Amino acid sequence: MSTNTKHWDTTSSEVGATERILQSVLAALNEGKSAEVADQFDDHFTFTDHALDLEFSDRGRLIEFFQKSRELFPDTVVEADAISEWRDQAVVQWKLKATQEVSYGGYFHRRVPISLRGVSIVHMKNGRVTRWSDYYDQLASRRSGLAAFFTEWIEY
């Protein structure tokens, strides 16, 4: 996984540490290690997936989200194209590749390749993620089914 990193503030003690944490989070995600990913988050955090309009601040729900994502898209790989750090914040430009298996009435199965680019904005405090926001094209991601597991339906 190669990254082009631009350090904006070379006097900060957090320079480089943020990138290492982000790389470790992406590696754990790629290996399906949801609890290991969640361990990088502070006790008080917010994870927001803007494409799916989901937000989590509970570690258990965050782990469940990552596990369900892995279950639906087991071959997902996310690679950082570039990481730009500034003090305790970073912007990660990434690309995601995955496959979705689609069935039609139980008779025909088709594997649909997924490839998209996105951006994550991450805020850190004391080496822990306090806020993580993902931005990407929801339609290209084919992840609306994932969002349905975490959306409460209200009947009127």
Image (cartoon, grey):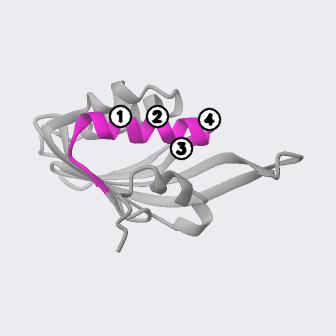
Q: CA distance from mark 4 to mark 3?
A: 12 Å
- Of mark 3 and mark 1, the one earlier in the sequence is 1
Q: Which mark is drawn over residue 67?
A: 2
Q: Which mark is drawn over residue 63?
A: 1
Q: Secondary structure at mark 4?
A: loop
Left or right of 73, for residue 105: right
Stretch of the chain drawn in magenta: 55-77
Q: On the image, numbered disc 4 is attached to which residue?
A: 74
- Of mark 4 and mark 2, the one earlier in the sequence is 2
Give the percent coordinates (x, y) of residue 85: 27, 51
Q: Which numbered mark, 3 or 2, is in the foreground of this view?
A: 2
Give the percent coordinates (x, y) of residue 139: 58, 68
Is residue 154 in the magenta section?
no
Q: CA distance from mark 3 to mark 1?
A: 17 Å
Amino acid type indicated by mark 2 = Gln
The residue located at (37%, 69%) in the rendering is 155
Q: Which mark is drawn over residue 32?
A: none
Marks 1,4: beta carbons within 8 A: no
Amino acid type indicated by mark 4 = Pro
Counting other residues with Cα less than 10 Å from the Cα at mark 2, is it few (<14), some (14-19), or many (20 or more)? some
